[in-house]
Image (spheres, coloured by chain):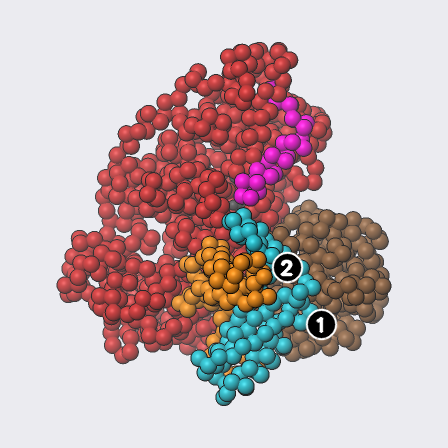
Chain colours: A red, B brown, C orange, D cyan
Amino acid sequence: MVEREVYCALGLTDAEYQKIEQIMGREPSSTELAMFSVEWSEHCGYPRSRKYLSLFPQTGKYQALVGEDSGGFILDDLAIVFKMESHNHPSQVEPKQGAATGVGGIIRDIFTAGARPIASLDSLRFGPLSEPYNKYLLKGVVDGIQFYGNCLGVPTVGGEIYFDESYSGNCLVNAMSIGVCKKKDLARARASGTGNPIMYVGSSTGRDGIGGCSVLASAEFGEGEEKRPTVQIGDPFTEKCLIEATLETLATGAVVGIKDMGAAGLTCSSAEMAHAGEVGMEIDLDKVPLREEGMEPYEIMMSESQERMLVCVTKGREKEIEDIFTKWDLHGVVIGYVTDDKKVTVKHQGKVVATIPTEALAKAPLYEMKMEEPVKLKEMKKLDLNSLPEPLLGHDAERVGSSARKGTDRFTVGIYNDVLLKLLSAPTIASKEWVYEQYDHMVQTNTCVLPGSDAAVLRLKGTKKGLAATSDCNSRYCLLDPYRGAQIAVAEAARNISCSGAEPAAVTDCLNFGNPEKPDRYWYFVNCVKGIADACKIFEVPVISGNVSFYNESPKGAINPTPTIGMVGVLNNIEQRCTSEFKNEGDVILLLGETKAELGGSEYLRVIHGKIAGEAPALDLAGEKAVQALVREAISRGLANSAHDCAEGGLAVALAEACISSKDKVIGAEIELKEVSALRPDVHLFSESQSRIIVTCDIKKADKLIALAEKHKVPCDTIGRVGGDKLSIENWVDLPLARLASAWRNGLKEALA
Amino acid sequence: MKFGVVVFPGSNCDQDCHHVIENVIRQPVEYIWHKSKKLDGVDCVVIPGGFSYGDYLRCGAIARFSPIMDAVIKFANSGGLVIGICNGFQVLLEAGLLPGAMLRNKDLHFICKFVELEVASTGTPFSSGYKKGQKIRIPVAHNEGNYYIDDKGLAELKKNDQIVFRYTDNPNGAVADIAGIVNKERNVLGMMPHPERSSEAELTSQDGLPIFQAIVERLKKNG
Amino acid sequence: MYEAQVRVTLKRTVADPQGLTVKHALESLGFNDIAGVRMGKFITLQLKAKDQAKAEAEAKDMCAKLLANPIIEDYAVEVIKS
Amino acid sequence: MYEAQVRVTLKRTVADPQGLTVKHALESLGFNDIAGVRMGKFITLQLKAKDQAKAEAEAKDMCAKLLANPIIEDYAVEVIKS
Ligand SMILES: Nc1ncnc2c1ncn2[C@@H]1O[C@H](COP(=O)(O)OP(=O)(O)O)[C@@H](O)[C@H]1O
Ligand SMILES: [Mg+2]
């Protein structure tokens, strides 16, 4: 028997090791053991999450493509392919290269499906910027994303950045990529046809990313220490060549199947391609282009060197393929062939070093995990509004609070100015310009709505149509209520898509959680998955791909449960796209949806009162659907000049953003709310009630818009007019645009200084 | 009349340039692979933006030695129209077809955004469609657009009216706010901003289009 | 005044795609006997330190804290009088 | 085998924003006696040249042709046996 120390170091449990022995009917070789360990890991085999992922709906208005590496949907004769993936741990260790290789990995998933990558998004989460290491992480991650994405020529068109204590010690880097191809050109990630050659293409193999094997090595081979780097270095230039060479190769029609070598490298690509095609595969490691000398077979099988792929080619056409890769100065070599024994057989220096049934590798065990609601949650949900002084900054709470409500006392004019400015400059809310201006977000000339609006909009050249894309998750809501928080993430993504005029079409996700072996973490996971599944059913959008990232913990505990949602929507006429900023002097401002006393989990509560508490905002999915249908119809009928959803920071922040987010022209607004006395001013201003959208419209069209809202049974209030050079909201806020803009535009930069 | 868009490994604005020429100004255009040694029959060479060879040593340094560059240099020296955009500009500098060199942006970050340019010279086959002093909006996207030339060189540029575009709000530290220059003979243009990204209404600015149109005009005149 | 010359190089085990690309470029220029190319940084620091030993200690401290990334890079410092 | 160590530095007359930024960063870490920082490249070439002189000549040729841009950069080459 292999020593316990060895398989434990590979991340295998006693039970798993026993199972492997049982499957093999003998003691596994070191190469075999390594192969099992990576294939059965959560990253590849999903043993702890598979069961619940099956809850996700897989159908919607558009025909969904689900399965294999990345999913997508069919739009006329096009396939829209997209996926999101995490690179959290590598980024925490080496932010630039970690993020860069994360982008590289997700983009490979897209073009191995035969699609040309047309856009990326990045969803990032860090601890507070008051800690120097968090600054270093953010700067490094952004540097890595720009370094890789810009060089590739794939525009990074959107994303999100949140800051929360829980990510100190475990940042999140989730990268999403979208690709497009003709439906008939979609490629498969499978091998078939006994005797067909298997080709290795791309970069050479080194010892990158070999982590857990060190013990394996010392137990068996006693190698020197300086042999195992775990940091992978991104090579966007090679990946760019690989994209072009791969798409050229697929166009030959000589490719049977193709898969990228991502996590678990050659092991995963060979086993899964063979398994998907119900065949076997024999590969000869002596043919693999190596970058380093003396690599052991298990090292070659586990290496996570970047920018490599495995291709199954029609017999007789390998030279053609080789020539294409040679033209792009890349490796393209036959390393094996398809067999009919449903086994992966690996040879090295003439000897068989592994032979495993693909079924056993590809079907990781399935675990039943314990789950339990965390005890402290009930306490956390308690929030008594009356215990919150309003407003705080330097005023006598009692006196100001009550007169502000009446809105008469002249001394109270603008008493919320400072609160609003503080929120606007909070890094979670502040403009992300410092980040997205470092990304080439225009290359490929499809970006019709640039970053800075609710969703990015891309045209589909050669058609009248466009795509809208966003990524969203407020993990604080998920912490307070995982089921509802996850639903809100889906709803917000859909709302952002709808505000651009597009209709939600499909979802990808990246499920970031703590250690699933701890029952409270697992409880969060399961409830978030259920929330996503149920919300997607209501919105009629399929979950077409995704990724699970467990074990996101630091010594201080788990990260907030963070089920990031990536969504793509369809715009039938690219000319009917909408952006979030106010356009014209004199336009009427309407608030769709209803404001309720919902400060639980809000940014206001955290930034101003230092609390993470209360109930997550309520979500009525039917009402949410109605508001979104309304805004889409208003946009398509030319009734809305702008649309912006209310998210973190509530109505006041959304209004301020609509005033100042355009770089060319800032424009003011004067707001008078309905039923002012019904709620506290801070609730009016900063409540994060869901399903609310601010739209503006030409005064002559206002009646039509109001009638449309009635038709959709959506509450709709006229709350003011666009114009002037300041934002005033009742007499609580009264600020010149320049002050709003400087707080919001400089907030992140200053926090990073 | 035919345009040729050079493709180096790592070029990534080649398809964007091709698209504008083919679908917006509707002229014949083809890609020219960098390993080719001939430009056959091309009337205007476009060296597109991107990261030729990853810009791994220095922007444009390795591309400058691609086999096609000998033909491009010959073409330029015999009066052919050559336009280098972004990385293309850097390649032209490395190749010595234009004077000066590129340094990293002064704040050391990649910058992608719309900028305002002032048309400083209309006396070139590329900028004749603008009015002198006209303000135009065209995006930049680069890491190393901080144009450098020594004082003597700068005086030369000025004396010969070689500065074609200047930034009105210098984003990268370039000497004398230079965004684009021509050679003395005025047939080779290098510019950091991307006119191909601002030639269609959907992309919010069409201020780059006159460059492509001016080239067409000139080539028509040349017959 | 002292000049500290700092060489920051990628650890031997870390892949260097830049170096590889430069190697290919040199080969295509006809340099045929190159076995390897590695790219690194060369940083010169002018230091107003009291003596050479202090300048060296300081420069090393700077490397450890900022100039090199210990996860992927090594560094070497040489100090001369300037 | 010889190792050519190539240092490529910005000419004195050319501004070095990166060096300046690094200087500020070092100062904010408490290093207070820095008079200047300049950033350059350090390239190591493994050469299968016949002898040291040949290796050096070759490395210099590489610098002149590709590794340095004479408009903005200087270079220095040192060859050791490896
Ligand atoms: N990491 C990022 N990368 C690129 N763009 C970003 C990033 N973070 C935010 N953005 C962009 O900034 C804008 C505002 O983001 P956010 O406040 O998250 O919007 P919303 O609340 O509507 O989801 C969006 O256009 C978004 O795509
Ligand atoms: Mg939004």
Nearer to me, D53 or A141: D53
Asked if residue A423 is among those painted magenta in the image, a careful observer would answer no
Q: CA distance from mark 1 to mark 2?
A: 23 Å
- Residue A746 counted in the magenta span: yes
Residue name at image x 85 percent, y 63 percent: B159
Q: Position of residue D44 (x, y in %)?
A: 50, 73
In the rendered image, the quadrant that contains the N terminus of chain A is: bottom left
Q: Residue furthest bottom?
A: D50
Q: Give the amino acid type for the residue marked by disc 1 in the picture.
A: Gly
Evaluate whether residue B199 shows in this view.
yes
Task: Judge the density around disc 2: few (<14), some (14-19), many (≥20) Cα neighbours within 10 Å.
Answer: some
Q: Chain of mark 2?
A: D
Q: Quadrant of residue A488?
A: top left
Name which residue type carries label 2: Asp
Rendered location of residue D15, percent (x, y): 67, 59
Q: Which label is found at residue D16?
A: 2
Dividing the picture into quarters, in which one does residue B161 lie? bottom right
Position of residue B152 relative to residue D4, above or below, is above
Q: In this picture, which residue range is highlighted in magenta?
A: A726-753
